Each structure stands twice: as C-alpha cells, then as structure tokens.
Amino acid sequence: MSDPDAASGAVSDAADDESEASEGGPVRVWLVERTYSDDEQNMVILVYATPDGTRYFRKERALTSFTDVRDTTAAVAVDPGNLGAVDEPDRRERYADEAARMAAAHDPDDVV
C-alpha cells in the first residue's frame, strides 16, 4: 500500500520513526504523559516519546485563560535534535507501552 505522505516527506507511521531519524528527518513521537506543573501555576507539561521509549520530547504550555484553546494531538513530528534520552529502564518501558497504546488507539493528528 502506498503512503501519500511519503512523497511529501511527512512522517507516515510508527515504523518510519527510526528510519526518518537516521535520515535526519522529523521523528514521530506519541503523547505518553500529561501533568500539571507543581512549580508554576497554570502550566501543563506534555511528554511525547518514541515508540521504543528511548527518546522523549517535552512541551510546556501556559494556560493563560479558559478561552485559550490549543489542541493536544496524539503525536507530533519533531527534529531529532530536540529529543532527549530516557535513561531509566522503568520509565523507558512505561513510555514504550504508552506510546504503543496511543498509536494503536489514535491517528497521529487526533486531538486527545
């Protein structure tokens, strides 16, 4: 089956994550954690991880008002240079499990 996004260079599915990274293209990461910051009021922390749980992308959002609407998607494509390493084996396993769950239940652009 051909992928219409492949020609445009977009990240197409979880199987492409590692191949895209090796070519220097964007890496798809899946939402694995959403927390509210204890340090800052009105701050939401979103953590996205690679399907194998070895790398993560952290995104912080300030909630400035109730009318401030910004969608959170199941996955995002990020530059490999913006990914951090997950060193803790337990966290790596948890992130991999959650990334797999999200990928199975949602399309990357689904609002979650």
Image (cartoon, grey):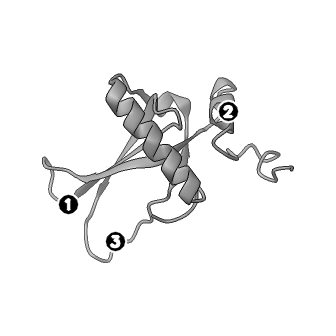
Kind of residue at badge 2: Glu
Decide which of 30, 65 is in the foreground and name it: 30
The Cα–Cα distance between marks 3 and 2, rounded to whole angstroms, is 33 Å
Q: Are marks 3 and 1 in contact (CB under 8 Å)?
A: no
**As displayed, is residue 91 above or below residue 89?**
below
At horizontal 51% and vertical 37% (from top left) the residue drawn is 50
Mark before the other along the chain sequence, 3 or 1: 1
Asked whether the residues under the numbered discs 3 and 2 touch, taking CB atoms below 8 Å apart as contact, a structural biologist would say no
Give the residue number, with chain letter if any, for mark 1: 42
Q: Amino acid at mark 1?
A: Asn
17 to 31, vertically: above or below: above
Q: Residue furthest right?
A: 1
- 40 is higher (above) or lower (below) than 109: above
The CA distance from mark 2 to mark 1 is 35 Å
Of residues 51 and 3, the one drawn nearer to the viewer in this rendering: 51
Q: Residue at x 52, y 45 (%)?
A: 100
Q: Position of residue 25 (x, y in %)?
A: 65, 33
Residue 87, given in percent of the width and then of the height, sits at 35, 22
| Residue beneath the point at 69% across and 37% down | 16
Q: Is 41 placed left or right of 106 in the picture?
A: left
- Label 2 sits on a secondary structure element that is helix
> Residue at 46% across / 28% down in the picture?
54
Crowding around mark 2 (Cα neighbors within 10 Å: few <14, some 14 to 19, many 20+) is some
- Three-letter code, disc 3: Asp
**Sequence order check, earlier mark of 3 and 2:** 2
What residue is disc 2 on? 20
Q: Eyeballing the image, is 90 above or below 8? A: above
Dot 1 falls on a residue whose secondary structure is loop
Which residue carries the number 3 mark? Answer: 68
